[in-house]
Image (cartoon, helix red, strand yellow):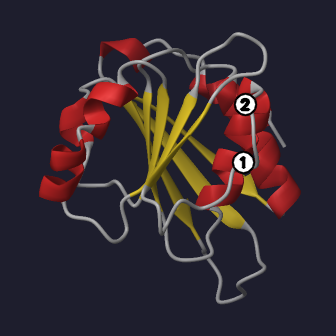
Amino acid sequence: MSEVRVQVGSADAMQHLGEQLALLLDVGDLVVLDGPLGAGKTTLTRGLGAGLRVRGDVSSPTYVIARRHRSVGGGPALLHVDAYRVSTQELADLELDLEAAECIAVVEWGRDKVEQWSSDRLAVAIELPTADPDGPRLVTVVGHGPRWADAPLAALGAAR
């Protein structure tokens, strides 16, 4: 298991972190995002989309549950899932895990709901360490499984 913690001071910095994270991702990778409302999960995913060069605006899929953004550069597609309003069983019924194997999957609110999709995954926790909703965030990225054992996650710490 590898881990890195990054302090992020702005929405632009959160998006940049997502762009840097995109450089480490490949088809079949699963990224599970956790954090309170307004922490920056969608902003980070927007950066992932920019880094992956996907079509369309990356926005919260809260009411549609999932959006698939195809690459404009021939790279992998981005499957962006919002699991806030759905149960683990409902996610299983949608068979998003099958689609996730063909692209890069990012699941907001996915903790304790999608870990069975892959033993190789990145868990990204975004914390608001102060009472100021516009204050800095602390982002912890933890790699699980052999895929992430030797991954250069520490490089994300320099991505500000």
Please give the name of the residue rendered at 31% of the width and 38% of the height, measured from the top-left corner.
Answer: 96
Give residue 32's quadrant in the image.
top left
Q: Which mark is residue 134?
A: none
Which one is in front, 120 or 70? 70
Disc 2, SS: loop
Which one is in front, 120 or 91? 91
In the rendered image, the vertical position of residue 8 relative to residue 36, given as above or below:
above
Label 2 to label 1, Cα distance in Å? Answer: 10 Å
In percent of width and height, residue 63 lies at 47, 69
Q: Which mark is residue 54?
A: 2
Mark 2 neighbour class, 10 Å CA radius: few under 14, some 14 to 19, many 20 or more = many
- Pointer 2 or 1: first along the chain: 1
In percent of width and height, residue 45 lies at 64, 47
In the rendered image, the vertical position of residue 107 relative to residue 105, given as above or below:
below
Quadrant where the N terminus sits is: top left
Q: Name the residue type under label 2.
A: Val
Please give the name of the residue rendered at 32% of the width and 13% of the height, measured from the top-left corner.
Answer: 146
Please give the name of the residue rendered at 81% of the width and 61% of the height, measured from the top-left corner.
Answer: 11
Disc 1, SS: helix
> In the rendered image, is residue 1 in sight?
no
Which one is in front, 130 or 78? 78
31 left or right of 115? right
Q: Name the residue type under label 1.
A: Arg
Q: On the image, numbered disc 1 is attached to which residue?
A: 46
In percent of width and height, residue 29 lies at 44, 23
